[in-house]
Amino acid sequence: MRMRENLAVEHDESRRRFCKIGLAGISVGIGMTMLGAGGVFLGAPAITNRAKGQWIEVGSIEDFEDGQFTQVVLEFSIQDGWAYSQQRMLAYVSRKGDELKALSATCTHLGCNVRYDEEGNRFICPCHAGVYDPEGKNIAGPPPKPLSLLPVKIEKNTVLVYNKNNEDEANA
């Protein structure tokens, strides 16, 4: 009789252990599902609310002197959910004959605006002494990458600059 009681106690303990492990597994599964759903809910706007690039008029072709950089302001609106906001971005446009080039004025180090130094024929970031050549290549200081080359085009004598450096998106 005693042996039968021991077997019953062992059987109850193993069943109890099985139930605890099963309940813990189900709880972990539900928790992970909720955590994943919360991550998607909170993270989705950062993925889906990417502002689309826009072509922005910056003047007529005559406004840009041959061989010179001209600073332009790109003004555009972006939508975040139901809210619209106006954004501004600086760029430099240069012209050589009928060929145009546009460089973002945003330093690739920490996002300060660079200025064009005519005497030195270079771009200088006033914040941390970053220096770029006329092609936008970083040549001194802490900037890790060149200035972004922005797509630019002429339509009916009007110069348009794309406010993103993704040429695939610009040509879409």
Image: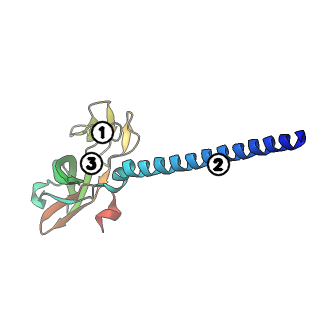
**Rendered image: mark on residue 111:** 1
Figure quadrant of the C terminus: bottom left
User: Could you tell me which residue is drawn at 34 percent across and 58 percent down?
Assistant: 166
**Rendered image: mark on residue 154:** none
> Does label 2 or label 3 sit earlier along the sequence?
2
Query: For the residue marked with disc 2, what is the amino acid?
Result: Gly
Compare residues 160 and 31 and report the one nearer the observer: 31
**For the residues marked 2 and 3, what is the alpha-carbon distance in whole angstroms?**
58 Å
Question: Could you classify mark 2 by the number of other residues whose Cα lies within 10 Å: few (under 14), some (14-19), or many (20 or more)?
Answer: few
**Rendered image: mark on residue 22:** 2
| Residue 126 picture location, percent across and down | 26, 31
**Rendered image: mark on residue 104:** 3
Q: Is residue 106 above or below residue 129?
A: below
Question: Could you classify mark 1 by the number of other residues whose Cα lies within 10 Å: few (under 14), some (14-19), or many (20 or more)?
Answer: few
Left-right relation of 30 to 4: left
Q: Is residue 112 above or below residue 27?
A: above
Query: For the residue marked with disc 3, what is the amino acid?
Result: Ser
Left-right relation of 69 to 110: left
Q: Secondary structure at mark 1?
A: loop
| Residue 122 picture location, percent across and down | 28, 41
Q: Secondary structure at mark 3?
A: strand
User: Could you tell me which residue is drawn at 50 percent across and 51 percent down?
Assistant: 33
Query: For the residue marked with disc 1, what is the amino acid?
Result: Gly
> Does label 1 or label 3 sit earlier along the sequence?
3
Compare residues 130 and 31 and report the one nearer the observer: 31
User: Could you tell me which residue is drawn at 41 percent across and 52 percent down?
Assistant: 40
| Residue 22 picture location, percent across and down | 64, 48
> Does label 1 or label 2 sit earlier along the sequence?
2
**For the residues marked 1 and 3, what is the alpha-carbon distance in whole angstroms?**
10 Å
Q: Nearer the viewer, mark 1 or mark 3?
A: 1
**Quadrant assignment, res 155:** bottom left
Left-right relation of 126 to 37: left
